[in-house]
């Protein structure tokens, strides 16, 4: 099993045993960024379906999002990694792995997202899975825009997703 450890975090694939902690993570009220539509909070059924979706990613593709655990507490504080989401954004987007990150709102601004995304990218790039990755961010989500820029994601198109504006980004890795 893949297990990445950083100074404060453990990143690992989802497990069915995560259900209660995962529901708590996705069910929590999240700080809202004005103008940014969030999928959270998720009700228990949708959180469970998401958990199963990402269990399947590891099985089908050999990669997927990681659960991010706080090393000190064992609490799930994020989800970071790569997936084939098939969002309908066109072959230039849907045809390659999509990077994703969500960190507990109480930890925003503390470097946790940077630490987790860096570990996930290092692992992904080291496997040579895909030189090109993409991500989708609401143009008002400045914390996510900063993470994308820090790790070399460059905008290539604006579009809409679920009636909200989004900017599509790509990253070309040196693998």
Image: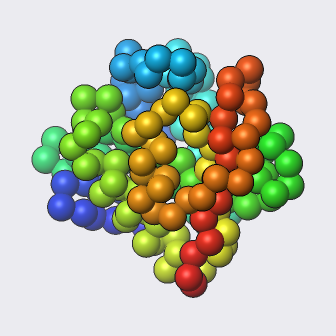
Question: Eyeballing the image, is 78 above or below 3?
Answer: above
In percent of width and height, residue 2 lies at 43, 67
The residue sitting at 40% across, 39% down in the picture is 143
The residue sitting at 24% across, 63% down in the picture is 6
Which one is in front, 78 or 17? 78
Which one is in front, 126 or 52? 126
In percent of width and height, residue 35 lies at 54, 18
Question: In which quadrant will I find the N terminus?
Answer: bottom left
Q: Residue furthest bottom?
A: 175
The residue sitting at 19% across, 54% down in the picture is 8
Q: Residue furthest right?
A: 91
Left/right placement of residue 49 relative to residue 102 reads right
Instruction: Tell me if residue 135 can be seen.
Output: yes
In percent of width and height, residue 33 lies at 44, 22
The color scheme shown is rainbow
In percent of width and height, residue 159 lies at 76, 36
The residue sitting at 74% across, 47% down in the picture is 157
Question: Eyeballing the image, is 163 above or below 56?
Answer: above
Q: Residue furthest left?
A: 72
Number of marks in the rendered image: 0
Question: Eyeballing the image, is 138 above or below 8?
Answer: above
Question: In which quadrant will I find the C terminus?
Answer: bottom right
Left/right placement of residue 76 relative to residue 33 reads left
Instruction: Tell me if residue 58 can be seen.
Output: no
């Amino acid at each position: 099993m893949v297990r990445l450890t950083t100074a404060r975090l453990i990143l690992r694939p989802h497990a069915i045993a995560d259900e209660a902690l995962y529901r708590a993570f996705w069910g929590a009220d999240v700080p809202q960024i004005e103008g940014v539509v969030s999928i959270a909070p998720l009700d228990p059924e949708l959180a469970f379906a998401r958990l199963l979706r990402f269990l399947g990613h590891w099985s089908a593709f050999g990669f997927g999002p990681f659960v991010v655990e706080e090393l000190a507490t064992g609490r799930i504080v994020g989800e970071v990694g790569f997936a084939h989401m098939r969002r309908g954004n066109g072959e230039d987007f849907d045809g390659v792995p999509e990077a994703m990150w969500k960190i507990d709102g109480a930890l925003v601004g503390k470097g946790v997202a940077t630490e987790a995304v860096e570990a996930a990218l290092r692992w992904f790039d080291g496997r040579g899975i895909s030189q090109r990755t993409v991500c989708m961010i609401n143009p008002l989500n400045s914390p996510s825009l900063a993470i994308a820029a820090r790790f070399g994601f460059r905008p290539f198109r604006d579009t809409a997703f679920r009636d909200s504006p989004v900017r599509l980004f790509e990253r070309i890795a040196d693998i």
